[in-house]
Image (spheres, rainbow, N blue to C red):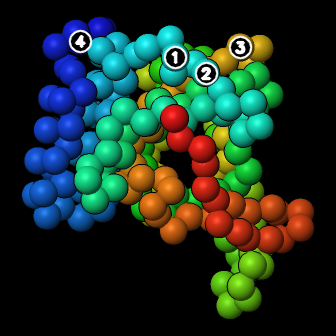
């Protein structure tokens, strides 16, 4: 059900109240997930420009909100057909809600001892195709990859405890067993 009254400013205010409550990460994710889902379904934030995809990146990252200290970052992310990301983490907690079209998430586990810089061994744990309204809640340290296996651009709403490019996050190559910083272009 569309909630035309749930605007970005109300959503951000609600999130601030939860984050400022001193809740643990697990409590934050549990309390924020229904709000992110509600806001994703509200339609108050959607714009055709959010379907634009960066040609080299394979996806578009459109900033809707971030706090002055780079916390509580809200993005609309568009995925071109056949596009996606390598396995990566977010450096903080994250909540993603499907908005338009299916997106496949593959979840990974790091199995090396993390003592060698630039080296990482990953093992695939599970995968799931998320559809509009589905919530992906990721505590800090979660590693996943995303792909759009449909024939059209898809859209999802992403909320992170810290802006993607201000968090210490990594991308991984499971075949080459490498880890390197993961920065994205944000519009």
Residue beneath disc 1: 49
Cα–Cα gap, marks 4 and 1? 21 Å
Number of callouts: 4
Q: Earlier in the sequence, mark 1 or mark 3?
A: 1
Task: Check disc 2 and report its element: helix, strand or loop.
Answer: loop
Q: Earlier in the sequence, mark 3 or mark 2?
A: 2
- In percent of the image, x 65 and y 66: which residue is there? 181
Disc number for residue 52:
2
Cα–Cα gap, marks 1 and 2? 6 Å
Q: Nearer the viewer, residue 31 or 170?
A: 170
Q: Residues within 10 Å of mark 2 (few under 14, many from 20)?
A: some
Residue beneath disc 3: 152
- CB-based contact (under 8 Å), mark 1 and mark 2: yes
Q: Earlier in the sequence, mark 4 or mark 1?
A: 4
State the image quarter where residue 152 is shown.
Answer: top right
11 left or right, relative to 165? left
Q: Residues within 10 Å of mark 4 (few under 14, many from 20)?
A: few
- In percent of the image, x 68 and y 31: which residue is there? 54
Q: Residues within 10 Å of mark 3 (few under 14, many from 20)?
A: some
Horizontal and vertical percent position of residue 141: 51, 66
Horizontal and vertical percent position of residue 185: 60, 44
Cα–Cα gap, marks 3 and 4? 26 Å
177 left or right, relative to 179? right
Task: Check disc 4 and report its element: helix, strand or loop.
Answer: loop
Front: mark 3 or 2: 2
Residue beneath disc 4: 3
State the image quarter where residue 139 is shown.
Answer: bottom left
């Amino acid at each position: 059900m569309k909630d035309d009254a749930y605007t970005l400013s109300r959503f951000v205010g609600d999130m601030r109240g939860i984050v400022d409550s001193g809740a643990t990460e697990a409590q934050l994710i549990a309390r924020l997930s229904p709000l992110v889902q509600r806001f994703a379904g509200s339609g108050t934030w959607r714009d055709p420009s959010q379907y634009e995809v960066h040609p080299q990146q394979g996806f578009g990252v459109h900033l809707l909100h971030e706090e002055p200290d780079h916390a509580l970052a809200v993005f609309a992310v568009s995925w071109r057909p056949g596009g996606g990301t390598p396995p990566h983490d977010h450096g903080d907690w994250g909540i993603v809600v499907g908005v338009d079209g299916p997106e496949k998430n593959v979840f990974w586990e790091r199995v090396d001892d993390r003592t060698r810089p630039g080296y990482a061994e990953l093992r695939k744990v599970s995968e799931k195709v998320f559809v509009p309204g589905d919530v992906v809640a990721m505590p800090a340290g979660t590693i996943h990859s995303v792909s759009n296996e449909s024939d059209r651009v898809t859209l999802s709403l992403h909320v992170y405890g810290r802006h993607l490019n201000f968090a210490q996050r990594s991308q991984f190559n499971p075949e080459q067993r490498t880890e390197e910083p993961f920065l994205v272009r944000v519009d």
